[in-house]
Structure formats: C-alpha cells, structure tokens
Amino acid sequence: MLELILGGARSGKSAFAEKLAMDHAGPVTYIATAQPLDAEMQARIESHRAQRPTHWQLQETPLGLARTLACIDQPDQLMLVDCLTLWVTNALLAEETGSTWASEYNELLALLDSPIAGRVLLVSNEVGQGITPIEALSRRFIDETGRLHQALATRADRVWWVVAGLPQCLKGETDA
C-alpha cells in the first residue's frame, strides 16, 4: 500500500505519519532524507530522532530513495519516508556533481509502478500554494515537487492532507 501525506511546514504531517507507523503491527523503517548541513538542521534531525521509537530501523537516504525502498521492501514492512521535499532538494543540488533529478524521479516512479510488498508512507511539504519565487532554482523546485506530488497521488492508494494537525483523506478508504 502506498500513502502520500501532504501538508504545509509544521502542519503535523510527520506526526500523523509517525502515528500511522506506530499503529503498524510489523517492522518499521524510517527513511530520513535530511542532511545535517548546518546547526539548525542538525538540531531538527536530533529532535526527530528523540521522538521516534527506538525499535524502528533508520535508513539515512539523501539520494537513491528508490534503491533504499527496493532493498528493504518486505510483506510486513512499513517504510516511512520523511520527507520528499528534502529529497527533491538534495537531488536538484546534486546535479552539479553528476547525480540527476530526472534519474531519481524516474527510478522512484518505476519502483512504485511495480508491486510493493510492504506499506509505504511518503511525507512531503505542499509548496505550490505560495508566491512564485524570483530565483530560478526555487521555481524549478516548486515545479518539480508539484509534478512529483501529482505523479505520486495518481499511484497512491491513499492521499492525506494535514492542516493544523488534522488529517483529511483526499483519496482512498480511511482507517485512521
């Protein structure tokens, strides 16, 4: 089962995804896409680590998301990816070093088009509701993230929108 969980910054989407994961009977792997590039991000990462159950597995995956998912996919496994917007940022910024956003994007969609044995929760920031940025990379980030969300929503069994900590199911049957 594939679930997409969208919301704004500090909307409660990660907490909601973690609640879904805590209710899962099988093993949970938290796939973190953040990189500790400054002190503030390091503090955010530490805060997230402290609130997660210690029995969850952790995979730090700033790039190569499809490969990570493919390697850990098992029938009873829940894979929580937090968050796609950081992964998109990592891939766009890595283009200068040879990695490309197009290959990351296409690999993920190809993986999700094949049968997935476990349950996947994809957390992402909805970034397309603000103004159009003046800087080209920021505009590209918003465009690529919007395209990604649309592609994932068509593939997802369930799509959630979280506002002020309140999850709303946009697609699929709810059991939360």
Image (cartoon, helix red, strand yellow):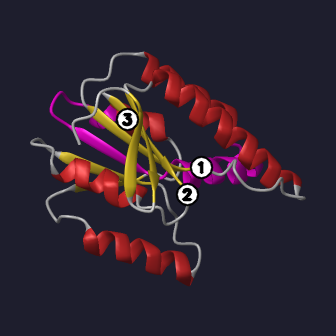
**Image position of 116 with respect to 25: above or below:** above
* Highlighted range, magenta: 71-100
The amino acid at mark 3 is Glu
Report x, y in % for residue 176.
23, 43
Are the two marked residues, 3 and 2, in contact with CB atoms closer than 8 angstroms?
no
Label 3 and label 1: CA atoms lie apart by 15 Å
The amino acid at mark 1 is Glu
Instruction: Work out which residue is located at the far bottom of the displayed protein and give it.
Output: 39
Instruction: Work out which residue is located at the far left of the displayed protein and give it.
Output: 25
Circle 2 residue: 8
Question: In this orientation, does residue 58 appear?
Answer: no
Circle 3 residue: 3
Are the two marked residues, 2 and 1, in contact with CB atoms closer than 8 angstroms?
yes
Report x, y in % for residue 38.
58, 79
The amino acid at mark 2 is Gly
Label 2 and label 1: CA atoms lie apart by 5 Å
Which element carries disc 1, helix, strand or loop? loop
Left or right: 48, with 34 as reference point: left
Circle 1 residue: 126
If you read the primary sequence from the N terminus, does the residue marked by circle 3 or circle 1 appear first? 3
Q: Quadrant of residue 145?
A: top right
Q: Quadrant of residue 116?
A: top left
